Image (spheres, rainbow, N blue to C red):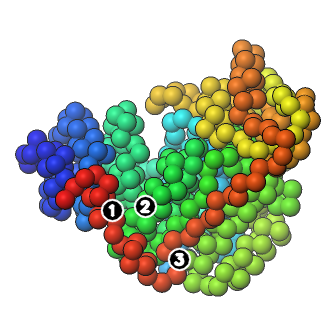
Amino acid sequence: MNLPDFIADTREGKSLSGERIQEFVAAVTLGTVPDSQVAAWLMAVTLRGLSYADVRHLTEAMRASGRTLDLAGAFPGTTLDKHSTGGVGDKTTLVMAPVVAAAGLHMLKMSGRSLGYTGGTVDKLEAVPGLRVELGADEALSQVRHIGAAFSTQSTELAPADARMYAIRDVTATVRSIPLIAASIMSKKLAIGAGCILLDVKAGAGGLVTTRKDAVELAELMVRLGRAAGRQTAAVITPMNTPLGRAVGNALEVREALDALQDPDAADSNLRAHCGLLAALGLRLALQCSSEVAAAKVDEVWRTGAALRKMVQIAAAQGAPDNLDALLGSLPVAPYRFPVRATSSGFVRSIDASLVARIASELGAGRFRPGDRIDPAAGVLLTAGPGQRVERGDEVAVLHSSSAAHSILTARMQAAVKIGVERSSERAPRTMIIGLEGPLPPSHHRYGDRCAERTGRQ
């Protein structure tokens, strides 16, 4: 194909045919397109956007660039896949997956390693000594068949074109393009082949998209792509200005997830509510049951300990200790802990998720470049939350580090915890669910028009 013309047509906002997109993706997969031209095309998309038809062609071409699985065929009526666009302290998968598996669903959760923040779900799981996440697709499917769920790295067999494009996006400032985000996520979800897909789209300073408007646009687009491929697909928009839960860091988040499964009443209320909501939505999607039935089932498997036992069973099947005490005891612990004290008396009004994320990364919990080694014990543990009354000098957080030099970060952490004389009067953003029941309203089907308007295309 004529790559310069293809790039120029994208830059000028011209519609691209499915055949041209398929040919480009095939060349990306084979490695016959140099990184420079892939990067040029990605930047053209970031600046000019794509029509809905072009995003759909791109998603399908990337899905078809490698092996595809058929979870829906293997486990009819009970398969669920879930994806979160990422956030600070987002250990939702570690809680939700065993809950829905204990409730009778089949879930193969393939995740990647992450840059920035703390690690991705795979990095969190690798904080457990002995736990293997490098599962081949067939091994992961076998575990799902016998246990109900498996955690695995994203297989290189699935959507390899996306893997190459994402690596280039990561170093060319093209990660936040809505069409590229949607195609990347949905190509992998469709390649896994679950019958139902649930998308958790975070909006706020600590998320991939920072505004609610962009989060809604992304969610609507992904729901449309999933439905066009014949998958039951829904999305939930949730805020990400404050860390989710109290732990930000890999082993710390695993511990918080296990503690929440063991005692839901003692868990952070926001984490408990969020995981419960996602699990119930997953059951509604897969089992076509009412919200009341789904919520009751989630509560049952959580409170009876069935979900906790399922999590221990999943972890043990992948090489971790086979009982809760040993699992918790195996988690690495940082040798240095630095308490962070409130600088004034009052109420915690907010906690800056983006600043907490940067501090956790500097402690060693995240990566700045591909290949960086993560310190699994490092991170931030919040000991006070929004709305809580604190006195000057009270502990509001603890930094966990393998280096005494990181004590200098305590002052920055103090700045992340905003304290005011009165409780914040701001109302929490409303959770929004898209696509769970019935067709999307007509206004939600205008992604291509909105994209054209945003980028100046006629």
Q: Determine which residue is flagged by label 1.
A: 450
- Residue drawn at x 46%, y 31% is 370
Q: Quadrant of residue 367?
A: top right
Q: How packed is label 3: few (under 14 Cα within 10 Å), some, or many (20 or more)?
A: some
Q: Is residue 140 placed above or below 357 in the rendered structure?
A: below
Location of mark 2 (residue): 217
* Secondary structure under the numbered disc 1 in the rendered image: helix
Q: Which residue is mark 3?
A: 436
Task: Name the mark nearer the viewer: 3 or 1.
Answer: 1
Residue 105, quarter of the rendered image:
bottom right
Q: CA distance from mark 1 to mark 2?
A: 9 Å
Q: Which mark is residue 194?
A: none
Q: State the residue in front, 285 or 324.
A: 285
Q: What residue type is disc 1 on?
A: Arg
The amino acid pointed to by label 2 is Glu
Q: Is residue 221 above or below residue 180?
A: below
The quarter of the displayed image where residue 289 is located:
bottom right
Q: Amino acid at mark 3?
A: Leu
Task: State the CA–CA distance, disc 2 to disc 3.
Answer: 16 Å
Q: Are marks 1 and 2 in contact (CB under 8 Å)?
A: yes
Q: Looking at the image, do the residues carrying marks 2 and 3 touch, with CB atoms under 8 Å apart?
A: no
Between 113 and 70, the one lying in front of the other is: 113
- Residue 181 relative to residue 106: left or right: left
Q: Return the residue found at the far top.
A: 405
Tell me which numbered mark, 1 or 2, is placed earlier along the sequence: 2
Taking depth in this image into account, of 243 and 279 the one nearest to the observer is: 243
Taking the image as drawn, is residue 236 in sight?
A: yes
Q: Residue 6: x percent and y percent?
A: 13, 48
